[in-house]
Image: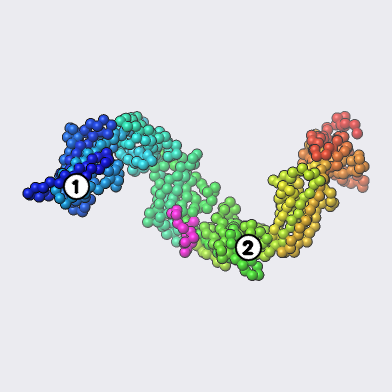
Amino acid sequence: MFRSTSAGILFISLSLSAPLQAAEVSGRVTDSHTGEGIPQAAVRALAQDQGQPSVQALTDRRGRYLLDLLRGRYRIQVEVPHSNYLPRHYGGSGDAEGGDVLHIPTFDSFIVLDLSLTMGGSVAGRVRGEGAVPLAKVTIRAESADHRVSTSTGEDGGYLLSRLPPGEFLLSAGTRDQGFVSAYYPGASNREDARPVAVEQRRELSGIDFVLQRAGAIRGRIRAFKGMEPLEGVRVVAERQGDPPISRVVTSDSLGRYRLAGLAPGSYVLSAAPPEGEDESSRQQPGWLRQFYPQQFIRESAVAVDVEPDLTLSGIDFTLMQECWISGKVVTLGDEEPLEEVQVIPHPVMLRDFSPTRTRTDRSGAFLLQGLPPGDYTLGMLLPAKHRRLIQVYYRDKLSLDRADRIELEEGKALRNIDFNLAAGATLSGRVRIEEPEYQWDTSRDVVELARLDFDPRGSENRQLRVGEDGSFRVDGTPGGRYALTPRLSDPNLIALRSPLPRMVAVVEGDLLEELDFAFRLGGSISGSVESASEAHGLNQLQIVLINFVENTSSVFDLPSPQYTLGGLSPGRYFLALRSKPDATHPSRGYGISQVFDSRLVEVVKGAGTSNVDLRVRRSAAERPPF
């Protein structure tokens, strides 16, 4: 039989008077590129049956070999020591599991088996420390997509990685005792910044050198907060500050001890936590909380430690606390229908910057909050769209975070039956209308404010209802009470057609209030700045008087800031005057006397804002314009 691969195999049956106990396997090992025989190639028959011996032979100067094998199963391997020829197995590659199994038959036979080898490449270089001192016993690793190999440096710091298949390799250097900082070629501190080395057939690449710096270390102990017992298997992570950050991880031993070695000099943030991959949902008891050094639950509150070369920083200890759990249900009020996909959100009272993981209710309305440090909490929620008509509350039916009842959690305790019963709220909807058909609302800034008017012990808060592109607005889940609806629109040129502008509504829970509309028309506006050069007249002592020549009316405006805008004005001519407040200037007189400091005549145009109308209080009367 003949096998069609890079190797040929031939079985010849022999009929002899005295039966042989072995088969002869012979053949030739050649260069796949030149076809010439390769001398001193090691051909091994690796026995696959227990108790069967393996056999080895070396090729002669023409690449020929001969193996005497007993009956059984073998894998044939060939390699050429001290060369760049890639080792291989018969029927496969260099992978020992990839070759074919050769069956030596029960009868006496003669087998011809030829194999060809491919030439790879090599990488060589030296590893030095500070002051160009050669470093021995440094591990050099070369890694490509499908090949890994390693070697160690000699006394002179030199190394050679031979028999590498063609491709791109990442090279790294590091010591077993981690006394030096591991590095990737060409001097990168992490894999992402490494530069691949291209290996080619029949090419010896040299000068791939490394310079390693002395490393520092951190050590300490991990213990439980209660009882101070040592904790085994806790992951300690040291993250060096920088871009990108570099992390090192170790695990505490049975005495709670840990040691982070091989650290590059710099500042590190340390944390300790249980091993990753632990399924929180399947745990029957509260686990350990992640902690940042020293004794912090928030990364931003951690204190970085400084690592110096060739020094060990001791006493960096952690005392871990067990997490707390909160569980309960979210159902509807009355019929107790379970509510699914409701987000339950814990709010720490003292740890203001700590954001615990929120959770969602399941089909039965149940929820479980895990990973909570001991302390006081309030609970809120976020309803999905399908439950938006219900009233969104905090724990114990409160409507604001400030009024919500607190929940006290003790270390390692599970608090159960923290339930929510949600009632149906009212729905309010309407539209902000304008006479201009092409007018576009600013959906990112235009809102209708919903403000509670009567006292609510549950802590109702004002809400901002977003105005849609068509001017519509809607709010669901509104608690019962009296409210004022007021448009807060970004365009100062709009004029309300209904006065007074706020719309009062009485809301009963479960109601549907529609057509809560507001009507506007397009006018103009005046804007500018006010500047005072007089120390006697600050902004709180000034007013702007606006006189409408067409309607023969006047309006007075106080100045909240140096920038002002007078909006919602009908088109036409206006007289603008900056004056002092009568009460602030003459508080003891029974009549109001004002002093005019500046004035302007302004034309207001429909749909436009008249800007840069600046007014000033000057130092002297001679500087003031005539009235």
- Residue 54 disc label: 1
Nearest the camera: 494 or 541? 494
Nearest the camera: 444 or 221? 444
Residue drawn at x 57%, y 67% is 417
What residue range appears in magenta?
Answer: 275-289
Of labels 2 and 1, earlier in sequence is 1
Give the image quarter of residue 561: top right
Residue drawn at x 16%, y 44% is 12
- Given this view, does label 2 or label 1 mark the residue nearer the observer? 1
Residue 449 vs residue 196: left or right? right
Q: Which residue is mark 2?
A: 395
278 inside magenta stretch = yes
Residue drawn at x 56%, y 63% is 363
Residue drawn at x 40%, y 55% is 233
The answer to whether residue 347 is seen in the rendering is: yes
Q: Secondary structure at mark 2?
A: loop
The amino acid type found where label 1 is placed reads Ser
Q: Secondary structure at mark 1?
A: loop
Q: Residue extending furthest bottom? A: 335
Residue 607 appears at what percent x and percent y?
80, 39
Give the image quarter of residue 42: top left
Residue 241 appears at what percent x and percent y?
49, 41
Query: Main SS type for the magenta part?
Result: loop
Disc 2 from disc 1: Cα separation = 75 Å
328 inside magenta stretch = no
The answer to whether residue 532 is seen in the rendering is: no
Q: Give the quadrant of the N terminus.
A: top left
What is the crowding at mark 2: few (fewer than 14 residues within 10 Å), some, or many (at least 20)? many
